[in-house]
Image: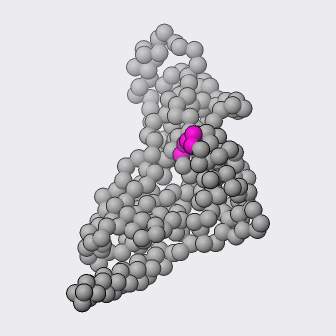
Amino acid sequence: MEHTEQTRCTGLAKSSTFYRSLYSEIEEVGWERLVRLGGDLTYLSFRILDAKSRVHFVEIELDETYPKSPPRVSADVPYIFDLKWSISSRLKDVVQQFQKHLEKLQEFWSTLDDIDKSLWVADPKQPSRSMCYRQINIGPVVDSLRRIWQRNSRKWTKDKPCLENIACLLETQLPRPIDVQKNDQQVECGICYAQCLPVDDELGVNSGSGTDYRCDNTSCNKAFHSICLGDWLRSITTTRQSFDVLFGNCPYCSEPVAVKITNSRK
């Protein structure tokens, strides 16, 4: 019994030391950047803005040997960076390396954003920052398209914008994007990344429903399931509640959001 109690006390002491150290590391990064923190403190998510004010989330998972072993890092980017880690490294080093990784992707994302804004993108419908391709609708099929491409392939120059180079290669004006979406088109939720909630009795009237809330910020306009946004807001310490309405900030642009909570879940 005495040995068991000693083992328990040793475990608690180690846990206490780990928690204090982790809180100190989070403070170095900034509590305002913290989006999620797992109950056992082994999972963290930070919100990072890049040079173009795009919002990114870096997810960090710690194992029981942290900081002796490096954390696992994931993010919505085309490829993840090679984390440089030593026994003296801290969470701020992960965030700093992630920020440098974002710097390398700025021109790439700016080109894709320009394509999404200016051309008729057939696929993907809801591109994420990790997607590296765009399928563009170029209008009626031209029989001599391959011949035109071969003739103009050397005309691609770095001093021209990407869209101008594409139009020059194809010798045609590319179709503009469709301005109005169909009313029945489903949009992915910015939290669960699904178009519709699962069909589940536990979700009550929300079972199988699509997104029903949008951020009012026109430059963001991210869609959510109200129930997903409500669950996310409950996990944030700065969220306020008045009667059955939660007041907080959009997880993508930090603009104020307010969502009515229901007792749909059984």
Secondary structure mostly seen in magenta is loop
Question: What residue lies at 64% left-to-right and 40% top-to-bottom?
Answer: 209
Question: What residue lies at 53% left-to-right and 13% top-to-bottom?
Answer: 141
Question: What residue lies at 74% left-to-right and 62% top-to-bottom?
Answer: 245
Q: Quadrant of the N terminus?
A: bottom left
- The image shows residue 250 at horizontal and vertical percentages of 64, 59
- The image shows residue 135 at horizontal and vertical percentages of 50, 29
Please say if 111 is above or below 19: above
Q: Position of 134 compared to 100: left or right?
A: right
Please say if 258 is above or below 165: below
- The image shows residue 10 at horizontal and vertical percentages of 28, 86
Q: Position of 166 compared to 154: left or right?
A: right
Q: Is residue 164 visible?
A: no
**Residue 217, image quadrant:** bottom right
Question: What residue lies at 57% left-to-right and 66% top-to-bottom?
Answer: 235
Please say if 257 is above or below 161: below
Looking at the image, the residue that sits furthest to the front is 1
Find the magenta span and give its range.
193-200
- The image shows residue 213 at horizontal and vertical percentages of 70, 48
Q: Position of 134 compared to 64: left or right?
A: right
- Picture mark count: 0
Looking at the image, the residue that sits furthest to the top is 143
Q: Is residue 75 visible?
A: yes
Looking at the image, the residue that sits furthest to the right is 243
Q: Position of 68 compared to 198: left or right?
A: left
**Residue 99, image quadrant:** bottom left
Magenta-drawn stretch contains 228: no
